[in-house]
Image: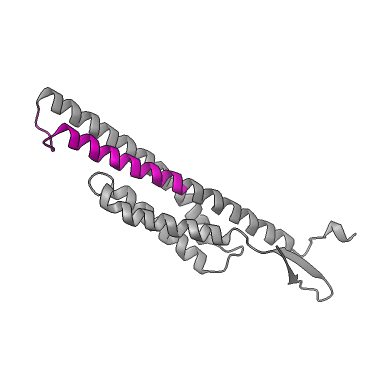
Amino acid sequence: MVAAVEHKDPTVMMTARIFTYRNPVRNCIYILALLYAASFAVTYYRGWWDTLVGLLVTLVGIAALLYPLDNGSVLLDVFYWATFGTIGLHVLAIGLISQDLIQTDINFTLGLPTSFQSENGIWNLYLAIIAVISVQIIAAAVTLNYCHRLRVEIAGNILLTHSDYTDLSTL
């Protein structure tokens, strides 16, 4: 969509794009926050720190959307780059949980004491945690995609409203 924006010079009328990706980013951030909050019950055993950091990052994203999106949208940039960090933490959490699963399975096979009584309980719990964290990775990646598009729209809007901008279609 295109909207008219006033220029510093009253005789010049410039056009600027409306942020079409603001609502998809908002929806993705809310879904991600709900996913982190709901999955905290599943991942509390081994991945609680990962889910907690992800929830804090989504709260930064929610705060970023409460303020006007302009050149000074620092919170949106912080959310964007911190989401990359949470994806890295998700991968690290899956690695640590997988290592713990393998170590517990080896201990169970060798007859050494483990924190669980049955082998099936070990696999079911750890695979559920890995599945939940994998869903978090996918949701965070989709959110990153929309957030990147919104950042591009913001940058384009800044260029369109710059004082030296000349619309070539009017020449």
For residue 123: magenta?
yes
Q: Specify the farthest residue to the right.
A: 171
Question: Is the C terminus in the top left, top right, bottom left or bottom right quadrant?
Answer: bottom right
Q: Position of residue 11 (x, y in %)?
A: 84, 75
Q: Quadrant of residue 125?
A: top left
On screen, residue 126 versus residue 114, left or right, reads right
Q: Position of residue 3 (x, y in %)?
A: 72, 68
Query: Which residue is drawn at the image coordinates 57% and 51% (left, top)?
Result: 148
Q: Quadrant of residue 111?
A: top left
Question: Is the N terminus in the top left, top right, bottom left or bottom right quadrant?
Answer: bottom right
Q: Position of residue 123 (x, y in %)?
A: 23, 34
Q: Could you say which is closer to the camera, residue 16 or residue 30?
A: 30
Q: Specify the farthest residue to the top.
A: 110
How would you classify the magenta stretch by its main secondary structure? helix
User: Which scheme is used to colour this image of the protein?
Assistant: one colour
Residue 69 against residue 128 in the figure, above or below = below
Residue 44 against residue 114 in the figure, above or below = below
Q: Which residues are magenta?
A: 112-140
Residue 27 against residue 138 in the figure, above or below = below
Query: Which residue is drawn at the image coordinates 9% and 28% (left, top)?
Result: 112
Query: Which residue is drawn at the image coordinates 82% and 60% (left, top)?
Result: 167
For residue 148: magenta?
no
Q: Could you say which is closer to the camera, residue 71 or residue 49?
A: 49
Q: Quadrant of residue 165?
A: bottom right
Question: How many numbered callouts?
Answer: 0
Q: Position of residue 74 (x, y in %)?
A: 53, 60
Query: Which residue is drawn at the image coordinates 34% and 41% (left, top)?
Result: 131
On screen, residue 52 versus residue 71, left or right, reads left
